């Protein structure tokens, strides 16, 4: 494979070639499940193209967005769970058309022992995800729902490099862990304030 998504994170073509030799690539459509909660983790995903969102479901059935995984990145929760032979505590869903490189768990152990660059990649990724989770805690604790909603819309626009976001109010409410009626009311207020334009199952960021 000519394209190396890890290069943007300052990792060499050699490490990506090694990963490609150990792993296999699968394609996913938007909103397709990459990894489900409570499923066995047999391989670690690394996003080649597109993006995936990582969600957590609470006991009452509500969901909340934890973080996005962009090209060249992986899911640290999958890595930790797989290394300890645990089932997944999160759900990963493709945000758009995506290609993902899966590294089997047994190969991950070999890479840790033989390739310092891979270990550095994991530590950096762990640090990044920890900061993102702290940001989520900060938002949930201190920010109002309208701020969280607008931040989420901006993140999605930045992620896809498109100000038109194809999404339902129900999907947004799930990612924010709130009720659909709350999201619909806030979006209507944002439209009145000329912050967004609303269409059928889409939002345009002004």
Image (spheres, helix red, strand yellow):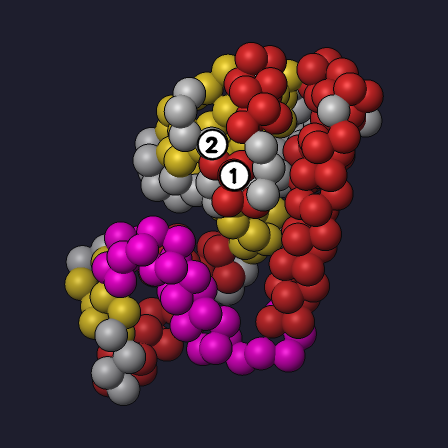
Q: Which residue is mark 2?
A: 4
SS at badge 2: loop
Tell me where residue 100 appears, x and y as whole percent: 47, 28
Is residue 92 in view? Answer: no
**Residue 99 image-quadrant placement:** top left
Q: What is the quadrant of the N terminus in the image?
A: top left
Alpha carbon distance from label 2 to label 1:
6 Å
Tell me where residue 24 appears, x and y as whole percent: 50, 15
Report the residue at 43% width, 61% height from top.
155
Instruction: Please provide the residue range marked out in magenta.
Output: 140-168
Q: Is residue 7 above or below residue 86?
A: below
Is residue 201 in view? Answer: yes
Task: Report if residue 150 lies within the magenta region.
Answer: yes
Q: Residue 106: which disc?
A: none
Q: What is the quadrant of the C terminus in the image?
A: bottom left
**Crowding near pointer 2: few (<14 within 10 Å), some, many (20+)?**
some
Q: Main secondary structure of the magenta part?
A: helix
Tell me where residue 102 appears, x and y as whole percent: 55, 22
* Contact flag, marks 2 and 1 (Cβ < 8 Å): yes
Report the residue at 52% width, 39% height from top.
7
Task: Report if residue 79 lies within the magenta region.
Answer: no
SS at badge 1: helix
Report the residue at 61% width, 47% height from top.
56
- How many numbered circles are shown? 2
Q: Which residue is mark 1?
A: 7
Q: Answer with left or right where residue 84 lies relative to residue 182.
A: right
């Amino acid at each position: 494979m000519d394209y190396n998504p890890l290069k943007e994170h300052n990792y060499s073509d050699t490490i990506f070639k090694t990963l490609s030799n150990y792993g296999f690539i699968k394609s996913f459509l938007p909103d397709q499940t990459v990894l489900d909660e409570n499923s066995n983790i047999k391989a670690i995903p690394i996003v080649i193209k597109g993006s995936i969102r990582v969600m957590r479901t609470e006991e009452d059935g509500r969901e909340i967005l934890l973080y996005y995984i962009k090209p060249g990145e992986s899911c640290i929760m999958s890595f930790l769970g797989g290394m300890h032979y645990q089932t997944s505590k999160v759900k990963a869903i493709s945000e758009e058309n995506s290609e993902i490189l899966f590294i089997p768990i047994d190969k991950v152990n070999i890479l840790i022992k033989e390739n310092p660059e891979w270990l550095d990649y994991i530590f950096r990724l762990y640090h990044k995800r920890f900061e993102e989770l702290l940001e989520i805690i900060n938002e949930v604790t201190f920010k109002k729902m309208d701020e969280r909603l607008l931040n989420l819309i901006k993140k999605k626009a930045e992620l896809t490099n498109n100000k038109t976001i194809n999404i339902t109010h129900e999907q947004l409410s799930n990612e924010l862990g709130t009720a659909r009626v709350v999201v619909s009311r806030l979006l209507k207020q944002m439209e009145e304030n000329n912050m967004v334009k609303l269409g059928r199952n889409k939002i345009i960021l002004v």
